[in-house]
Amino acid sequence: MSRLSFDIFCRVVDNFGDIGVCWRLARQLAGMPEQYAVRLWVDDLNSFARIEPRLGGVIPGALLDGVDIVHWTAPAPDLAPHAVVIEAFACNPPPPFIARMRQRDSVWINLEYLSAERWVASCHAMPSKQANGLRKAFFFPGFTPDTGGLLREPGLLSRRDAWLADPLCRTRLLRKIGVPDAHIASLGEGARQVLLFSYPDAPADSLIDALAAQVEPAVILAPAGVCPGLSRGQHGPVYVHDMPFVDQADFDRLLWSSDLNCVRGEDSLVRALWAGKPLLWHIYPQDDDAHMAKLDAWLALSPFPPSISALMTAWNRGERDQCRTLLKQALPPAAWAPWRTACASWSRQLSQQQDLASALTRFCLELQKS
Ligand code: TRH
């Protein structure tokens, strides 16, 4: 049996989710006890550098966290394929590379987007017959054990809990992203911390109104360029802080330490689930409202009470008044406590499932034998 080694192809369509998922997967595979060789092909290094500042300092040919990063240019560098080639989100590896995969007899995985829809389980692991004889299969992430699972590094939840147990860790991180001392102090005294990573049309003003109506003040952390229509600074008792982009490790820590996480797309949703805190998901918009069916499928799996599902739907539909009303109901202690409990227990429950990278390596070993 050939030892596993991986090429991961990533084309940045827009935003940060494509590279966000691929970078996490690449690092996890490279960090496994087997020390698999991993090469990550990325077409847009500028987007990558926004979430991985160390990239700028990498000497060509050197590894970053054990991963060999290749700039996927056209024409593509002339490299010999690894045993497993993962194309993320049907990004089409270069044809000459595919021809070399045939010579090497690599197995070929199409890693798909995350969805909670029911059809995913029946398509997960499905072979895709190739005229050139290569063994190719679909691999679908998902929320249930009959899918490929979710990306989760070993010991993630314990590391989260250990980090949260030391309040100084949070203070240092807030300082690092430039939160003024007075607001750090107010967070220490019980102000609500909200991470706002949504698409531009999120009804963020209704969030501000609802937070302003609560007993405690709030600090919203808004990454640079996110929700550009929302002015930074003080809105009554709510302070909106314009934070710089941070690397994925610090992004996770901000999710862990926030009281409410407004996330979007794919990767930040999964990371917010691992944070186990109340979250508002802004799903990636698609033509013909296809994303709303995906949102409904996810809500059907969730343990959220109907009022939170209604809030999530209103948030995604941009229904400002409805959002304001539902948020005002969701934020006070009587509704907040069950929402928090539901999120914490869903996080624990999901973490019982096999993680995506482990499921993928097992699947590849089976495919190699076939
Ligand atoms: O950026 P996104 O909107 O990406 C989207 C989705 O993945 C969508 O499904 C896909 O079709 C589209 O891209 C092309 O949201 P997402 O998926 O949450 O990815 C954001 C990544 O950016 C995630 O890995 C976290 C990371 N990030 C940081 O590392 N640091 C930061 O400061 C911020 C704000 C984000």
Image (cartoon, rainbow, N blue to C red):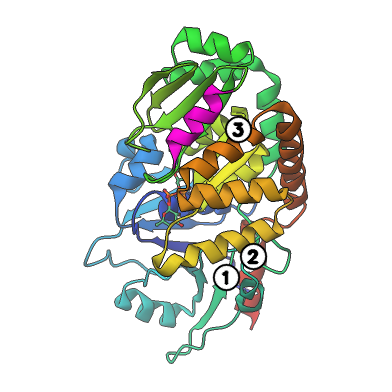
Q: Residue furthest left?
A: 75
- Residue tagged 1: 139
Could one spot residue 146 in this view of the protein?
yes
Q: Which of the 4 image quadrants contains residue 204?
A: top left
Q: Is mark 2 in CB contact (under 8 Å) with mark 1?
A: yes
Q: Residue at x 67, y 32 (%)?
A: 160
Image coordinates of residue 95 in percent, x first then y, are: 31, 78
114 sits left or right of 331 in the view: left
Q: Quadrant of the N terminus?
A: bottom right
Disc 3/disc 1 C-alpha distance (Å): 40 Å
- Residue tagged 3: 328
184 or 63: nearer the eye? 184
Q: Quadrant of the C terminus?
A: bottom right
Magenta residues span 203-213
220 or 349: nearer the eye? 220
Q: Compared to 348, does 136 lie above or below? A: below
Disc 3 or 1, which lies upstream in sequence?
1
Q: Residue at x 41, y 23 (%)?
A: 241
Q: Amino acid at mark 2?
A: Gly
Q: Residues within 10 Å of mark 3 (few under 14, many from 20)?
A: some
Image coordinates of residue 361 in percent, x first then y, are: 63, 64
Could one spot residue 27 in this view of the protein?
no
